Image: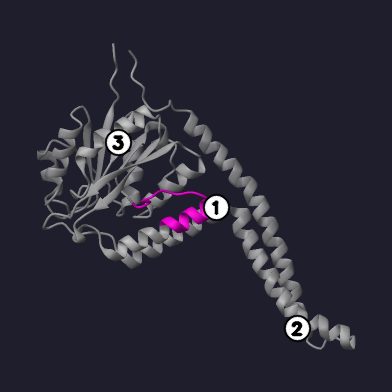
Amino acid sequence: MSVSPVIAVILPCYNEEAAIAQTVAGFRAALPSATVYVYDNNSRDRTVDIAHQAGAIVRTERQQGKGHVVRRMFADVDADIYVMADGDLTYDRKAAPEMVRMLVDEQLDMVVGTRQHEAAEAYRGGHVIGNKLFTGLLARLFGRSFTDIFSGYRVFSRRFVKSFPVLSEGFEIETEMSVHALELRMPVGELVTSYGARPEGSASKLSTYRDGWRILKTIGTLYRVERPVFFYGSLGALLVILAIILAVPLVLTYLDTGLVPRFPTAILVTGMVIVAVLSFFAGLILDTVTRGRREMRRLAYLAHPAPFVAEK
């Protein structure tokens, strides 16, 4: 006797009446046993009605922003395997079974569908460059990264979803997911998937500069929270270097004349060194706090079973 996993396909969407019916139908065909959820984020068109007609379970999140929607989805939906994709018809629904198989067979906690686009209108040039820059930055700060950290096409295990404290509000949610997996050293994988152009009538909600800035701030915040010794230690080291540069002329003058003519500069140098030392010790203290938080997240992660394995 075999037991099939409970699979939930969850689609955050906003004003996607041009694409939602085909998106729902595509995932229902690709994963016949899955339950498809559409989480509407205050659409002002017929997205909700069309999603209902397409056979999806439709729920609403009033707080605007993809991060708020993901927080609600992960809290409300109960499943063994979660497939998350945008409701704009850009992701390859036919790749979902292979991503699920990869998660189960390799006992992974997250599989990221890395986007491979052929049509120029599918992926704006600025977004391609930004993705590469932020992916490289994440790898430099956290030691490793993913090929496509901004992909919204992901498959999760239950223990990933139920141990993930969603704190983001908008499109920086994918960055937070990536860092969560990296910090808990979860087994993860990637699968190249095709990425298509939006259908006529569907527009991207991602603002290149506004959301890019928010993503950059999120990476900085996560680095400060998850790597406090390096973050505050770097600030302290910078202050020490500046203090040494300012102190060299004072020391030379003192050795030559026995006087300290620029007393305010000497006070400034002393203050900078004191702040640098305080910054370093703040990093050490916060590192202890971070370690405790990471242990609690790890225990929450381990409280759930490994990715589903069929029993025979």
Q: CA distance from mark 3 to mark 1?
A: 31 Å
Q: Which residues lie in the magenta part?
A: 135-150
Residue 45 at what x, y percent from top left? 13, 54
Q: Earlier in the sequence, mark 2 or mark 1?
A: 1
Q: Give the residue at x 22% y 32%.
A: 35
- Look at the numbered disc 3 and give the secondary structure of its residue: helix
Residues tagged 2 and 3 counted as in contact (Cβ below 8 A): no
Residue linked to disc 1? 225
Tag on residue 135? none
Q: Give the residue at x 61% y 56%.
A: 230
Near-viewer residue (227 or 293): 227
How would you rate the neighbour count of disc 2 (Cα within 10 Å): few for under 14, some for 14-19, many for 20 or more? Answer: few
Residue linked to disc 3? 99
- Residue 86, visible in the rendered structure: no
Q: Which tag is nearer the camera, tag 2 or tag 3?
A: 3
Q: Amino acid at mark 1?
A: Val
Residues tagged 2 and 1 counted as in contact (Cβ below 8 A): no
- Look at the numbered disc 2 and give the secondary structure of its residue: helix
| Side of 237 relative to 155 (left or right) | right
Residue 21 vertical position relative to residue 234 in the rendered view, above or below: above
Q: Amino acid at mark 3?
A: Met
